[in-house]
Image (cartoon, helix red, strand yellow):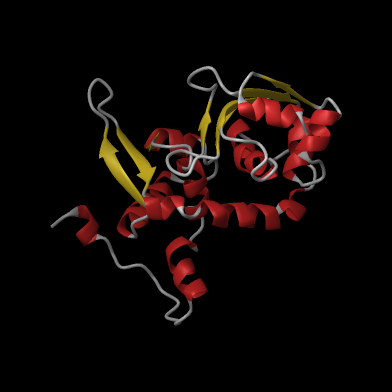
């Protein structure tokens, strides 16, 4: 019997309502944050655990099994010399991007100033920044973002595959953005638009791609 077949059935609200059915799948604590991490593409278990501070190893393993059972993610072994197992979203799992974006927009009012106890990773600003880019007005391409906390890159306009990636862009990006912590936090809270930040010199834009040109024209 396969591992998936041995998994216990998920708990259900037993309500004939699409919202309730959705929460049956993604309503457990940590599930949507795991989706956030996997929107960056395939991730190893150790990488997921490192970027989800506060989650126990048992809970993370349980959530990943639940997500595989429910068709949100898959687990596969990388070819040599990697030979490590990675987790990645299925198409069904990637469809949660607009859900996370809507939830993130709704939650902006809860951010406030960063607390001393708040963990932070540079790539956690990827979805807020992607959400803040002018819809349809920034073109398509790879945008490298440099923050004080680290670097990440966005795949602007991508309909399939990763939405963002941790670290510098794999090649020469279409645009490179440099901004400080205060600016990134203000954008994440919805207090500052990307256009105003570029015009005010709080976001430095360089590059020759269509995304850079579109941002410089704001």
Q: Quadrant of residue 138?
A: top right
Q: Which residue in the rendered view is the most extreme toward the right?
A: 200
Q: Residue at x 67, y 26 (%)?
A: 212
x, y percent for residue 103: 62, 57
In the displayed structure image, the side of residue 4 where residue 103 appears, left or right: right
Q: Residue at x 32, y 53 (%)?
A: 68
x, y percent for residue 141: 55, 30
In the displayed structure image, the side of residue 209 where residue 81 appears, left or right: left
Q: Relative to residue 172, is residue 122 depicted above or below? A: below
Query: Which of the two residues, 156 or 85, is positioned nearer the viewer here?
Result: 156
In the displayed structure image, the side of residue 106 where residue 78 appears, left or right: left
x, y percent for residue 110: 74, 54
Query: Which of the two residues, 119 or 20, is positioned nearer the viewer here?
Result: 20
Q: Residue at x 36, y 67 (%)?
A: 10
Q: Relative to residue 5, is residue 185 depicted above or below? A: above
- The C terminus: image quadrant: top right
Query: Which of the two residues, 66 or 108, is positioned nearer the viewer here?
Result: 108
The reply to whether residue 180 is in sight is: yes
- The N terminus: image quadrant: bottom left
x, y percent for residue 105: 68, 53
């Amino acid at each position: 019997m396969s591992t998936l077949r041995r998994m216990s059935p998920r708990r259900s609200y037993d309500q004939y309502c699409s919202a309730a059915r959705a929460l049956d799948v993604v309503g457990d604590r940590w599930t949507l944050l795991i989706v956030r991490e996997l929107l960056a593409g395939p991730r190893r278990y150790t990488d997921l655990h490192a970027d989800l501070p506060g989650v126990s190893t048992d809970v993370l393993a349980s959530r990943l099994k639940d997500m595989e059972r429910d068709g949100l993610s898959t687990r596969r072994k990388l070819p040599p010399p990697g030979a490590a197992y990675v987790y990645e979203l299925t198409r069904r799992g990637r469809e949660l991007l607009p859900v996370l974006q809507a939830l993130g927009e709704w939650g902006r009012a809860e951010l406030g100033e960063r607390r001393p106890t708040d963990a932070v990773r540079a790539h956690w600003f990827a979805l807020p920044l992607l959400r803040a880019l002018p819809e349809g007005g920034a073109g398509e391409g790879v945008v490298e973002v440099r923050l004080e906390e680290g670097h990440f890159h966005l795949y602007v306009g991508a309909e399939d595959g990763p939405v963002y990636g941790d670290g510098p862009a794999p090649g020469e990006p279409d645009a490179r953005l440099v901004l400080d912590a205060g600016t990134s936090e203000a954008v994440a809270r919805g207090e500052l638009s990307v256009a105003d930040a570029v015009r005010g010199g709080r976001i430095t834009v360089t590059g020759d791609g269509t995304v850079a040109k579109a941002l410089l024209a704001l």
